Each structure stands twice: as structure tokens, then as C-alpha cells.
Image: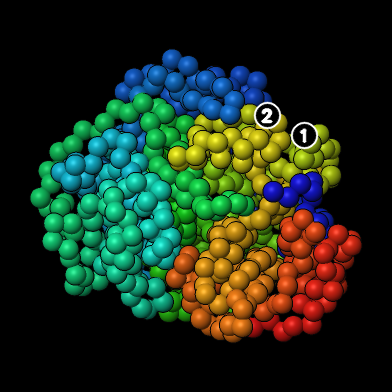
Amino acid sequence: MTQSPMPASDHPASDHIDAVLHETRVIAPSDAFRERARYSAEDYERLYRQSLDDPDTFWSGVAGELHWFKPWTQVLDWHPPHAQWFVGGQTNIAFNALDRNVARGLGDKRAIVWEGEDGEVRTYTYAELLREVRRAANALLDLGVQPGDRVTLYLPLVPEAAIAMLACARIGAVHSVVFGGFSVSALADRLNDAQSRVLITADAGQRRGALVNLKANADAAAALAPGLEKMLVVCRADCDAPMQEGRDVFWHDALNAASDDHEAAPLDSEHPLFILYTSGSTGKPKGVQHTTGGYMVGTYLTTQAVFDLRDDDVYWCTADVGWITGHSYSVYGPLLNGATVVMYEGAPNHPDWGRFWDIVQKHRVTILYTAPTAIRAIMRQGDELPAARDLSSLRLLGSVGEPINPEAWMWYWRTIGGGRCPVVDTWWQTETGSIMLTTLPGAHPSKPGSAGLPMFGIEPAIMTHTGEELGPDDGGLLVIKRPWPSMLRTVYGDDDRYRKSYWGEIEGVYFAGDGARRDADGYITVTGRVDDVLNVSGHRLGTMEIESALVAHPSVSEAAVVGRPDDVKGECVVAFVLPQGDRTIDPAELRAHVSREIGALARPDAIYVADALPKTRSGKIMRRFLRQIAAGKEIQGDTSTLEDPGVLDRIAATQPV
Ligand code: WTA
């Protein structure tokens, strides 16, 4: 792991830092928004203080708004680095999202408004969603799924994805959602790591007008996952998929055969809820493990507070359920709050780049939560597409997943929000479970490019790698100084990795892996990863993962991967490869190979074929220099530690393919 307290000047984040350092605009919420907002600046001050000074009272108050079958006896049990929250309590997150909302009169309220890429719309009220989830829960029980069993989901963004997640939660099974864009081998690795006996997939998904054959991928992965016994197959296309006798069952057949009578299981607060695989700086992706009570309380509170949620909101988070944002803010957080959630299956540019604005107009979306990469891609298409739609229903905008550059922020605020909607820039991670840094939209002014202030109960600091706390405006490492309810509990099957990656970098604090700076007003600007994790279009990829995929190809003997700043994706993948013996490297074949090994999102944008890599005498690859070459910059820094300094000039003189 990188030990420098700040990303070096050649780090991909540096352009962003330059832009943000010169950014002085402060944008306050309108009076109209502020007057109706759930939280004022004073509310935030008071509650934030209480959440740090008297966390038991604060968190008991929040958790007490939800249903517990059995009350907790202790709010927090902290044996660093292991935390248990709401100890002794029993609850069920699916019960809280559905039964509780139906019981308080929301049965006829729309829970999910789903739009397929082909324009089909399906709506579920809270009562209908509850019935579907009960049937799905019974269908899983009929397959022999037991509490604690891992169920893997490999689905397009269809309502069945949310239904399957909630059904698992309802019976205490642990879901592991694998993004539908991941490859056969990525799916097989995750099935095996989680030892899943059951996979829920679909015959196909729709993407840019074409069908993606998920079932074929699932079948190929199943051949590599000996522990897999059953496959439930959702029909999204024509139900034509080949079904393996004894193993495969259509979702609709299983649900039709199942009773819609089911009582949610009372589960221990620390009962595992889900595993979600994410990339780290070393090794294979890690299964981030979340549990029931704390995650429920964290997503419930943050959705309500950060999105200023009201009864009549139509809330749309564009994230796929394959990522943490889809878990926390397309499914659990908004449903726990009884919100109407819009889900959209397809691509933002199908049939054209106005699709998001068609959806906003058609469903009268009031809150939109999306990623900077989408904003930048849409911004490039000009203002005509949004200008031609009625976006007047919008009242609040959110951004997540990567640093947002001030230009994109301003465009989002002005062109999409009409200058009337506050923009919340929310920093958090798969591991944190819920939003950690943000402004509260009616309480705080925004500073474009800066996430803002800590959420309730979150105590961040900026430190050097030796644990010294830095003052205002000093760049350093972002850490969190105390546990919070929705934090990850461990890395599935590898607690040692949990201790080392998160609590072992800097003694006694949670190490986020991001660089950051805090200004005199306490606003924190997150500048990007300081480790070997890339953020491509808001998706996390480990350089090591891509390197191992590259060297697995017979034409490659060695590989190094770095990120390069990209106007739309934030960062893109650049690979440096050494040919194996006298083999020639075919760039198209190598890209296809990376797609097969990981998924299309990991394909290198540029490939340099080199005769050597810049290594120190001890054999460590100096990626810093490769980042400079990839970005087309002059080589800066001390090259004398390199075994062969001439290698840099030779690589820089090569044209990438
Ligand atoms: C980055 C996504 C700057 C950061 C929720 C983090 C951000 C990683 C922001 C986590 C933001 C996320 N500003 N950077 N508002 N939000 N990041 O696990 O580098 O997919 O460590 O979770 O995304 O990515 P993950």
C-alpha cells in the first residue's frame, strides 16, 4: 500500500485537486428549500454533537423508530476492530421495509416504479411488494435455503433483484449480488468464495437495445462452481433459456407454487445481511460483510436526512443493485423510509442521451441521485436534451461514487437543477455501508467539488500515515476515528484481511484508502484513492486484478496497470505489458481477454507494449512513473533507484495501442 500521505503530484487525482483548490464558489440552498427542509443548520449542530457526546442516546433514538422483535440491551460493543451494534436486539430489515410500512398505512403507496430499457413500466405498491417478497421467501425455503446460507444474485436491474434481496433478508439468508456486467470467471470466483448453493439469475438483460445472455454466463460459471446446486431463472426475455433438469427452476414457477403467507424471521442484530465483493489494492476482490441492525439503522437515517425525504417524493437512484449504492440507496434505505423508488434497467444513452430526462419527466422524479461519470457523459452532449424536457419536478440532486469536478457540479446544478435544487455530494464506500460525508441540503451551503461535513455519528480526521492529525488545508489520509452502525464487520472468510486493510494501516482508526483535505469550515474534499485501486466510471477496480488477468494470457509475461485521468470516466485503465518470448501481442485479443476474465469495465483504454518495466533493484514496479507516461507528462521524481532508468524513455517513446 502507498505510504505517502498525499497522492503524488502525478496521481490521477491531481487535476481534480488543482480544479478544486481554485474553486471558491459557495452555493446556499434557496429560502424555499431551506424553510421546508427536515434539518436546519442548528438541528445538524445539535444532533451531530449529541451523536458524538452521547452516542447511546442518539442511536437508540434512531433505531427506536424502526421495529424490533426484541429490544437491544447494549447499543455498542466495541472490541477493536470488531464492533457489534444493538447487541441482543432482534429485528428484520425486510419486515421494516415492507410489513412495517404496510402496517402504517402505506400499503397502497407505490414502492417500486420500474422502467425497462424498452419502455415497459411495472409498478409495485408496498402491499404488492410484500406479497411478492413473501412468496419469494417461501420459494427459497422450498429450495432448502437456511438462515446464514449465501445466495448469489446475478441479475439485470429488474424488480426481481430487489424482491430477491428482500426475500433473502426476510429468511436470514445472506445475499451476494454480482453485477450483471461481470464475466463468467468473476461470477465463478464469487460463487466459490461465498460457497453459494443457490444462484438467482435471468434469461437475459437488456442493454443498449441488445439482449445480454446472463443465463449462458451463469451456466458457464456453474460449471466452475462445484458447490452450486440450484438456479432460479427470472424471465426477462422470452423464457427460452436452456434449463438443466434438476438444477434450474423458473422464478415464476417457483413463486407461483409458493404460499404468500410468511412471517419474517426475527434475526439477531448482528446476523449477516449480505456480502458484496469489491476491489482492494492487493489480491482478489474481498467480500465485504454487512450485518442486519446497524446497516438498517444507518441506511434508514442517511436516506431520510441526506435526501430530505418527504411522503410525496419520487426518488430515483440510478445505481445498479450490483454496487453498494444500489443496495443502500436503490433498495434498503428508501424502502425503509416508505419512499416511492424509481428503477431503470438500461443504459443512459438508449435510445439517446436524453433518456434520464425522459424518465424524470415521465415519472415526475423529485430526487435524483447519480454518478459524476454519468453527469459528465451527458453534459458533453450539450444542453438541448435536458432543455427539451420538463425537469420542474426535481427538487434535490445527489452525486456519488467518485470526486465530482466543479465544472460538472455547476452544470448539474444549473442545467438539471435549474439553480433551484441543492446538490449533495456524498462520500462513502462499500465498506461504510451508508453515507459518511455530505452536506444536509437545507442546512448547509455547498462548495462544488467538496463532499462536506460528517454525517451523524461519524468522526473523520485527516492524518499522516504515522497517525498524526493534520490541520486545515493540509492534504493527508482520510480516516474515521470511531465505529459506526453500518460499517463492515469483516471480510468474508478472511478476518485477518479486515484487520490489516482497514484498521491496521494506521493504529486505532479506520483507513479509507482515500486522500482528503479539510478546510477551515470543516468541509472535507476527497481527492481520490491513494492506493492501487482505480475508479473507472465510479466502479472500483484493483490494478492487481487487471494485472493478473493480463498475465494469464499466453502472449503476456509481465504487466503493470495504472489509471489515467479521463474527462468522462474519471479514470481509465492503461496497461504496460511485456510479451512472452517472441510472441506478438494482439491488443484487440488482449482487451477481449480482460473482458472475459473480469468484465468489459476493466478493458484497458491504452496498451503499451514494452521490453521492460521500471523496477527498483528490489524488483518493485514504480507505477508512479508509469502514471506520468500514461498521462503524457514529463517524467518527474528521482529515477536513480531504478535498476534501468533508460526504460522510461523507451516506454515513453512507444505509441500505445
Ligand atoms: C470514491 C461507492 C469522492 C472514493 C459509494 C471511495 C468518492 C470509493 C465519492 C468507494 C465522493 C465515492 N467524492 N470520491 N463523493 N464517493 N468516492 O466502494 O475513492 O464503490 O473510496 O462505494 O469511491 O467506492 P465504492
The C terminus lies in which quarter of the figure? bottom right
Q: For this view, does 576 lie left or right of residue 487?
A: right
Mark 2 and ligand 1: say if the CB distance to the nearest ligand atom is below 8 Å. no
Q: Do residues under tags 2 and 1 come within 8 Å of each other at their CB atoms? A: yes
Check the image and report above or below for 270 versus 602.
above
Location of residue 201 in the rendering, given as x and y in whole percent from the top left corner: 29, 59
- Cβ of disc 1 within 8 Å of ligand 1? no
Q: Is residue 556 above or below residue 156?
A: below
**What is the crowding at mark 2: few (fewer than 14 residues within 10 Å), some, or many (at least 20)?**
some
User: Which residue is at 59% across, 25% downward?
Assistant: 80
What is the secondary structure assignment of the residue under circle 1?
loop
In this picture, residue 19 sits left or right of residue 127? right
Relative depth, front residue between 593 and 132: 593
Q: Quadrant of residue 416?
A: bottom right
**Residue situated furthest left in the rendering:** 257
Question: Circle 1: is it few (<14), some (14-19), or many (20+) Cα within 10 Å?
Answer: some
Q: Kindly identify the residue that appears in the image at 13 percent across and 61 percent down.
A: 245
Q: Earlier in the sequence, mark 2 or mark 1?
A: 1
Q: Which residue is mark 2?
A: 508
Q: Is residue 478 visible?
A: yes
Q: CA distance from mark 2 to mark 1?
A: 9 Å
The residue singled out by tag 1 in the image is 467
* Disc 2 residue type (three-letter): Gly
Residue 138: numbered disc: none
Q: Residue at x 52, y 68 (%)?
A: 552
Q: Is residue 246 above or below residue 382?
A: above
Q: Amino acid at mark 1?
A: Gly
Q: Position of residue 240 (x, y in %)?
A: 18, 72
Residue 76: horizontal and vertical position, in percent?
Answer: 52, 21
Against 407, residue 275 (above or below) is above
In the rendered image, residue 579, in percent from the top left (x then y), is placed at 62, 77
